[in-house]
Amino acid sequence: SAVISQKPSRDICQRGTSLTIQCQVDSQVTMMFWYRQQPGQSLTLIATANQGSEATYESGFVIDKFPISRPNLTFSTLTVSNMSPEDSSIYLCSVEPFEGQPQHFGDGTRLSIL
Amino acid sequence: GENVEQHPSTLSVQEGDSAVIKCTYSDSASNYFPWYKQELGKRPQLIIDIRSNVGEKKDQRIAVTLNKTAKHFSLHITETQPEDSAVYFCAASSPEGANSKLTFGKGITLSVRP
């Protein structure tokens, strides 16, 4: 299966700042997704990262807060903007290598906002 | 949209016993049902999945059953071992146009007592 590298693995940030998380895959994949997992909670889909076009956001998530880029079939970034303590969470990238194949997750980015 | 319910939230079994985890879903159009295992501090890992054209699938000590009429599916783990202790998430995928997205249950914490 595809090898997914996510950076950074963790960070501690000041409120009001922004952080960009990178997701790199070792092969071209059809679909890339970004999830949030709050402490002790389930996985919530933030958006689908579309190659060469704007991401598709889920209800409750907006582009101004979580801008996403996907310049090619192996790379995507998620930015968490103007962070507040409520944004403290694990952010996970996942990929669906080909249509109909299972999603696989990266190791996640553990983000703490002071 | 899809709603996935997972019960109970915790389950404790004796090593060697079987464990059964149940999930229900709401969207009759959902056609793909994966199960993920997440150990503490690790990424969610796919352990088994089933599509709506199949009623049961087995992989060594793990099996999944699907009842489309009742809209529920279950994970069965036989001969449980301490390393099976983890959080297990079920998910359902609803087709939306050319894409499909996963909706996750809240997760169940399985503890296997030695």
Image: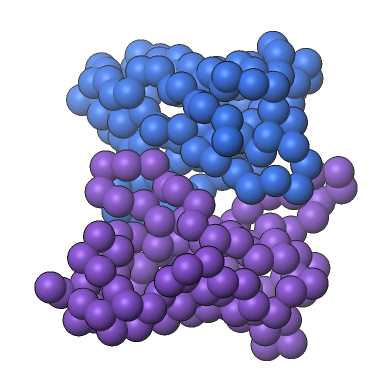
Chain colours: A blue, B purple
- Residue at 70%, 62% (x, y): give it: B32
Q: Is A47 placed above or below A17 here? A: below
Q: Quadrant of the C terminus of chain A?
A: top left
- Residue at 49%, 57% (x, y): give it: B47
Q: x and y percent of residue A75 in the render?
A: 61, 16
- Residue at 74%, 31% (x, y): give it: A30
Q: x and y percent of residue A13 in the render?
A: 27, 18
Count of numbered labels shown in the rendering: 0
Q: Quadrant of the N terminus of chain A?
A: top right
A14 and B102: which one is in front? Answer: B102
* Left or right of residue B72, residue B87 in this image: left
- From this viewpoint, is residue B70 visible? yes
Q: x and y percent of residue A49 in the render?
A: 67, 28
Q: x and y percent of residue A10 in the render?
A: 29, 24
Residue furthest out toward the front: B60
- Residue at 66%, 38% (x, y): give it: A96
Q: Is B55 placed above or below B97 here? A: below
- From this viewpoint, is residue B7 visible? no
Residue furthest out toward the left: B114
Q: Is B66 placed above or below A63 here? A: below
A31 and B53: which one is in front? Answer: B53
* Left or right of residue A91, residue B96 in this image: right
Residue furthest out toward the bottom: B70
B108 and B26: which one is in front? Answer: B108
